[in-house]
Image: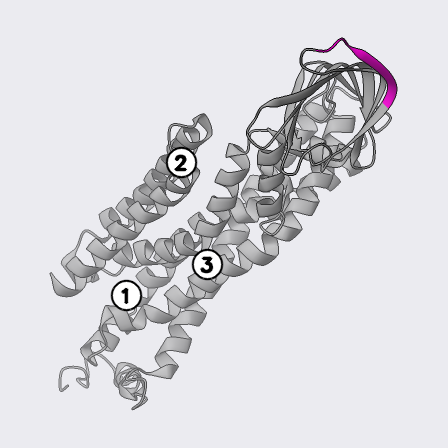
Amino acid sequence: MRALSSPRLGPWLTSLFQVFSTRDDHAGFSTTLAIYIARQFMLSTLSMVLALTGLVSLFDFIDLLRRAATRPNVPASLVIRIAALHVPYYIIYVLPFGILLGGIVCFSRLTRSSELIVARAAGISAWQFLASPLACALLTGLLTTTGISALSSDMFRSAEMLDQTYLRTGGGPLTLNGGALWLRQSDDGLVPHGVAILHAQDVHLINGELKVSGVSIFRLDDRDRLIVRVEAPNGALGDHQWILHGTSVLHPDHLPQHIGDMTLPSDLTVGRVQESFASPDTLSVFALPGFINLLERSGFPSIRHRLHFQSLLALPILAGTMALVSAGFSMRPTRRGGVARMLGSGIAAGFALFTISKVAEQFGESGALPPVLAAWAPTGAGLCLAVALLLHMEDG
């Protein structure tokens, strides 16, 4: 106590020590200190997130300008609009790194100014004064998952449509021109809990209508036994139904029977078929579970969508993990030396976690890892690293 009030430290540190020593008897922790550290952490984090988002958006804008340079009919205003529509997506993308770098800046500044040293001298452990930054990081991640992701999905979908229409050549997944289509859907028209497997040899999207040709439909019972086979030279996907023309029905051990036009109810629409081929980033966290179930019922692959959904769920925990990692690498007292090396190690650890997450994502998309494990493994690895650092710093 005498050392903290000595003239060498100055009267401001003495006052700071008195404020930090004022505790709530019920909480056992200074509310003033918690609010102060949380404010400093959020200011640094938001500044870093905005700076990183601006930097990434600038590179995206330059890339869009390069692609638009070969198209004289594309105005610069359209390029600016597409780049602006990408901004919420990049906020989600850079959020973990913004929290990591912002936390490093915040905690290193508090350590250099001796504020954290005074707080710890007042009997406050690292676990206590990290509670408020951790809560802020978790809340930021939760708001990003529930709020910004919904905004990002709508804006990213609009940007993809504009990009597809004006900047890309040769079509893309949303054009659905050519190629075969396989899908599986529920079919209660013949027996309860039946299944229909549809195969179309050629698919075209013409004026917003999905046209199919060379159609074969296998209608099965709940035990996957064939009931009837339907053949049609062409058809189209209407409003929650397939409309087939020139249809022939083939029952087992019977001759083909020509019945003309036929309709088959379906859960699919043209928009949902397009979305199944589009990026999962065009769907919000609230729309993903129902759409994943629809994809699985229809026979479309849903690995990318399940992986994206789990990544959004893991984002709040990842944000809290980055806050703890930044604290573990930046609260080393300056008198011990090696501060620059510790800060560099923190940044390197952040990029290592990013690399691990991308590798795990590739394994998840290939099916080598379950989507849950691929999305949550980097978060778990970072959390173990952060807890080990803090235990070493506080108790080691």
Few, some or many residues within 10 Å of mark 1 (<14, 14–19, 20+): some
Residue behind mark 2: 370
Q: Earlier in the sequence, mark 1 or mark 2?
A: 1
Q: Residue furthest left?
A: 396
Label 2 residue SS: loop
Nearest-to-viewer mark from 3 and 1: 3
| Proximity of marks 3 and 1: CB atoms separated by less than 8 Å | no
Tag 1–tag 2 contact (CB < 8 Å): no
Query: Is residue 223 covered in magenta?
Result: no
Name the residue at the front extreme: 253
Residue drawn at the location 78% of the way across and 37% of the way down: 240
175 or 218, nearer to the observer: 218
Residue 349 visible? The answer is yes
Q: Tell me the element at label 1.
A: helix
Looking at numbered disc 3 in the image, what kind of residue is underneath it? Thr
User: In the image, what residue type sits under mark 1?
Assistant: Thr
Under circle 3, the secondary element is helix
Q: Main secondary structure of the magenta part?
A: strand
Instruction: Report the span colored magenta.
Output: 254-261
| Quarter the N terminus occupies | bottom left
First of labels 2, 3 by sequence position: 3
Please name whichever residue, 316 or 394, is drawn nearer the observer in this view of the structure.
316
x then y, percent, for residue 73: 84, 25
Residue at x 69%, y 46% (from the top left corner): 154
Q: Find disc 3 in the rendering and name its residue.
A: 45
Q: Is the residue 26 above or below the residue 246 in the image?
A: below
Spot occupied by residue 152 in the image (x, y as percentages of width and height): 63, 48
The residue that disc 1 covers is 111
Residue 114 in sight from this viewpoint: no
Pinpoint residue 297: horizontal percent, then vertical percent: 60, 35
